[in-house]
Image (cartoon, helix red, strand yellow):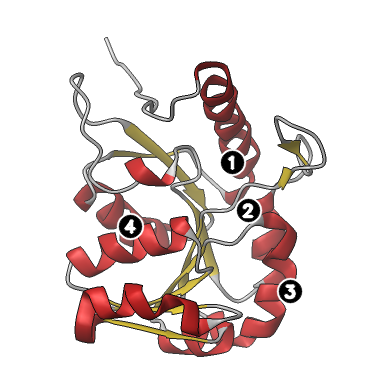
């Protein structure tokens, strides 16, 4: 499968690495594609870089991995029609960095996931990978076994696709329902970040235990 990633930071590149490791081809979209030259070179023919519109058009599946402040403009430049009928993995958290530690700019009655689904009305948006730092997104290793990745979205077929990727990356995958579940997952990301700022370490993830 071909994947188009919107966002060229560490998150986008890390997920791009993981998808290429699963033998997908990946184009990362950026405002400055030239800055991805080293990443493209690392992966040879499996990787490419282009504009946001290029990546959205290229991908049979898409990943939104932008900072929240730039998400709206990035999707406008990508062209909402270019995401129609595609599985779109939303990795964003709506963070407000006006003070530190950051806080949520959207929450309780709305979420980034729901906002992106409204911006891309014909896409099949699935929230995933937002509850952990990027170094652990692909093949996390913990003494206690595989951590849990919670996902949500309105389309069961899209969630099946994302479940397959999450599982192949080494996670247990749990579906918590419709895209409104993003309100919970973005709050869960805040819990992850609270512990990060208190301990100055990102080597943690969540696991659902059953009796």
Q: Is residue 107 above or below residue 202?
A: below
Sequence-wise, which precedes: disc 3 or disc 4? 3
Of badges 2 and 3, the one in the foreground is 3
Tell me if 177 is positioned left or right of 164 in this view. right
User: Is the Cβ of the residue at disc 1 closer than 8 Å to that at disc 2?
Assistant: yes
Q: Residue 118, can we see it?
A: no
Sequence-wise, which precedes: disc 2 or disc 4? 2
State the CA–CA distance, disc 2 to disc 4.
17 Å
Of badges 1 and 2, the one in the foreground is 2
State the CA–CA distance, disc 1 to disc 4.
16 Å
The image quadrant that residue 143 belongs to is top left
User: Is the Cβ of the residue at disc 3 closer than 8 Å to that at disc 1?
Assistant: no
Q: Residue 165, can we see it?
A: yes
Q: Is residue 193 above or below residue 153?
A: above
State the CA–CA distance, disc 3 to disc 4.
29 Å
Sequence-wise, which precedes: disc 3 or disc 1? 3
Element type where label 3 sits in the image: helix
Tell me if 169 is positioned left or right of 97 in this view. left
Q: Nearer the viewer, residue 158 or 24?
A: 24
Sequence-wise, which precedes: disc 1 or disc 2? 2
Q: Residue at x 66, y 62 (%)?
A: 116
Residue 43, image x and y in percent? 23, 76
State the CA–CA distance, disc 2 to disc 3.
16 Å
State the CA–CA distance, disc 1 to disc 2.
8 Å
User: Is the Cβ of the residue at disc 1 closer than 8 Å to that at disc 4?
Assistant: no
Tell me the quarter of the image containing the C terminus: top left
Tell me the quarter of the image containing the N terminus: bottom left
Residue 160 numbered tag: 4
Residue 73 numbered tag: 3
């Amino acid at each position: 499968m071909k994947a188009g990633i919107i966002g060229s930071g560490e998150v986008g590149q890390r997920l791009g690495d993981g998808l290429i490791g699963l033998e997908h081809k990946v184009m990362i979209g950026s405002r400055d594609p030239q800055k991805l030259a080293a990443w493209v070179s690392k992966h040879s023919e499996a990787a490419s870089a282009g504009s946001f519109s290029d990546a959205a058009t290229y991908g049979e599946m898409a990943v939104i991995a932008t900072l929240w402040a730039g998400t709206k403009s990035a999707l406008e430049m990508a062209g909402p029609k270019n995401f129609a009928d595609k599985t779109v993995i939303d990795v964003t958290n709506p963070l407000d960095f006006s003070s530190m530690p950051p806080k949520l700019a959207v929450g309780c009655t709305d979420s980034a996931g729901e906002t992106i689904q409204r911006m891309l009305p014909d896409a099949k948006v699935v929230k995933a990978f937002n509850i952990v730092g990027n170094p652990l997104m692909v093949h996390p290793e913990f003494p206690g076994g595989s951590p849990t990745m919670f996902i949500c979205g309105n389309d069961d077929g899209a969630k099946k696709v994302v479940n397959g990727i999450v599982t192949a990356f080494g996670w247990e995958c749990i579906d918590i329902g419709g895209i409104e579940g993003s309100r919970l997952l973005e709050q869960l990301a805040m819990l992850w970040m609270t512990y990060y700022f208190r301990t100055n370490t990102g080597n943690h993830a969540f696991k659902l235990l059953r009796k």
